[in-house]
Amino acid sequence: MSIDWIYPALTATSVFAGFVDAVAGGGGLITVPALIYAGLPPAMVLGTNKAQSACGTAMATWRYHRAGLFQLRPNLPGAAAVFLGAMIGTLVVSHLKAEWLRLIVPVLLMAISLYTLLSPRMSDADAHARVSSKGYLPAGTAVGFYDGFFGPGAGQFYTMSLVTLRGMGLTRATALTKLFNMTSNIASIIVFAAGGKIMWLLGGCMAAGAMSGAWIGSHMASRLGAKVIRPLLVVVSLSMTGKLVWGWFAG
């Protein structure tokens, strides 16, 4: 790819990725391969992707909060748990290989896709919470660790855990997912930036695109709710499953 086209091409790509991520998660499925194709070293791919993704999730978080879909103060302990988990996960990934996760994650994503398709709980109706906000902290820490360590599907894992454990409707769970996603991204950025693993100019251009896409996606999801989120969640989950399975057998 010519250097003349890298910045505008990746910025345009991040607009679409930001839209998808705001509605259903999984924007990294789009941006990470694009960054790899552009020729960035693997560590720079992960760091730069986190930098642009954080801005997109920040925009979506702001939009969902303005729409009244979640309150900030009651969810600060959960965000703190996510931050801690993501920080540890990002530190660990620099010392351990994540190859074994490439076999496990597709199975988890397929399960999420089937759950999304078949479960009557996957709607905007709130249900009985199995755990309190404090009881959710271990799950939030675990998903945060996963997001920092590996990443693909973290948005789906946040959303499904909030629906299943906290009894949230799909739109409210998606909104709170953006807060947690943004938190885990910030934790990862701190670690990657300290190691000099972020291309800031490229990340800034992509961030502008991601924020634009996230604004559109979060606006649409806030208005249309589960009838938009549910099918896109399934498509993104199945797409990530296919990509990870292909990568496992091809690599």
Image (cartoon, rainbow, N blue to C red):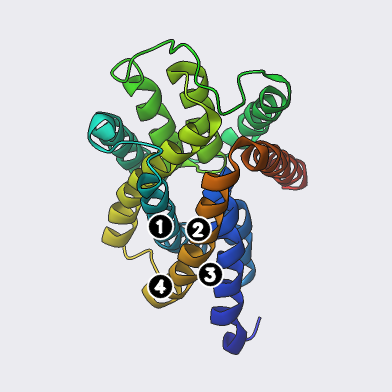
Q: Please, what is the three-letter code of the amino acid marked with disc 1?
A: Met
Q: Residues within 10 Å of mark 3 (few under 14, many from 20)?
A: some
* Spatial CA span between label 1 and label 2: 6 Å
Q: Please, what is the three-letter code of the amino acid marked with disc 4?
A: Gly
- Residue 244 to residue 202: above or below: above
Image marks 1 and 2: residues in contact by CB distance under 8 Å: yes
Instruction: Decide which of tag 3 and tag 1 comes sooner along the chain.
Output: 3
- Left or right position of 174 against 109: left
Q: Please, what is the three-letter code of the amino acid marked with disc 2?
A: Ala
- Residue 56 to residue 8: above or below: above
Residue 214: assigned label = 2
- Position in image of residue 225 (x %, y %): 58, 39
- Position in image of residue 240 (x %, y %): 67, 43
Residue 204: assigned label = 4
Instruction: Decide which of tag 4 and tag 3 comes sooner along the chain.
Output: 3
- Residues 64 and 95: in front is 64
Q: Residues within 10 Å of mark 2 (few under 14, many from 20)?
A: many
- Residues 172 and 163: in front is 172
* Spatial CA span between label 3 and label 1: 26 Å
Q: Residue at x 60, y 53 (%)?
A: 20
* Spatial CA span between label 2 and label 4: 15 Å
The quadrant in which the N terminus is found is: bottom right
Image quarter of residue 249: top right
* Spatial CA span between label 3 and label 2: 24 Å
Image quarter of residue 229: top right
- Residue 13 to residue 160: above or below: below
Residue 59: assigned label = 1
Secondary element type, mark 3:
loop
Image marks 4 and 1: residues in contact by CB distance under 8 Å: no
Return the residue at label 3.
40
**Between tags 3 and 2, which lies in front?**
2
- Position in image of residue 177 (x %, y %): 44, 38
